[in-house]
Image (cartoon, coloured by chain):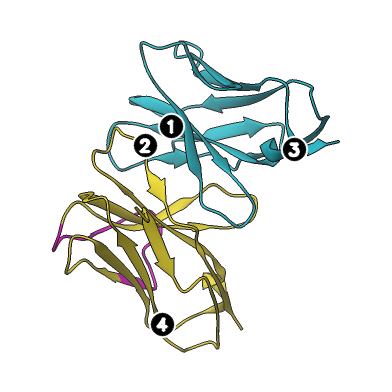
Amino acid sequence: KNQVEQSPQSLIILEGKNCTLQCNYTVSPFSNLRWYKQDTGRGPVSLTIMTFSENTKSNGRYTATLDADTKQSSLHITASQLSDSASYICVVSPGDYKLSFGAGTTVTVRA
Amino acid sequence: NAGVTQTPKFRVLKTGQSMTLLCAQDMNHEYMYWYRQDPGMGLRLIHYSVGEGTTAKGEVPDGYNVSRLKKQNFLLGLESAAPSQTSVYFCASTFRTENGYTFGSGTRLTVV
């Protein structure tokens, strides 16, 4: 069964600090990997999409990396802000509708 | 541009009751999806549609039905609600499957 595992399950960081979230997957075939941000009570919002040939992509203070050989991805948040408090979801696509979602990492940023 | 709109936002049902969740998108997207999100789990696909008049089963379709009579609308029905259907339901749409999805804000359903 295709799986997407995220770690840690949750983390707390101080405002202004950096953090890195991890995503390991076993999905095959592989088309692209997506990171979504989900605020409490809202739907997920796309941050980045990376294909097999891309190993890094940035969206403002968010930088995602992908190692398709080891089937690992990370999302790095730089200079965190209170508004970064959310759940971050890793999603792997085989190229059709069968997206595999991770359970998410809950990030809490404290002043 | 509203994106993806879900109604209602909250609902409490008694076991055995029926209801319909509505998803509307104004982006002319072909593909539409219904997911459920449960604590500690990733989103799971219930049903999906690849265009007007088409529907197909996803990962967890039992107890649900869908219809896509118009391109912009995707309805999710529960004929006889069960407590196991207590969840947060998300609708999503996209122009192409390799593109990012646009999600609605969700419907929180409680079945008692």
The type of residue carrying mark 2 is Gly
The type of residue carrying mark 1 is Val
Can you identify the residue that label 1 sits on?
A92
Question: Residue at the left extreme?
Answer: B53
Q: Gap between marks 1 and 3, in whole Å? A: 27 Å
Please name the residue shown 46% across and 10% down the image.
A55
Residue B30: where, in percent of width, then height? 20, 49
Can you identify the residue that label 3 sits on?
A82
Chain drawn in cyan? A
Is there any visible trace of residue A107 in the rendered image? no
Residue B45: where, in percent of width, then height? 40, 53
Q: Is residue B85 above or below residue A66?
A: below
Which callout, 1 or 3, points at the residue further toward the start of the chain? 3
Which contiguous range is marked in magenta?
B52-65
Asked if the residue under mark 2 is in contact with the one under mark 3, i.e. CB atoms within 8 Å, the reply is: no
Q: Gap between marks 3 and 4, in whole Å? A: 38 Å
Label 4 sits on a secondary structure element that is strand
Question: Residue at the front extreme?
Answer: B1
The colour chain B appears in is yellow
Label 1 sits on a secondary structure element that is strand
Residue A7: where, in percent of width, then height? 68, 30
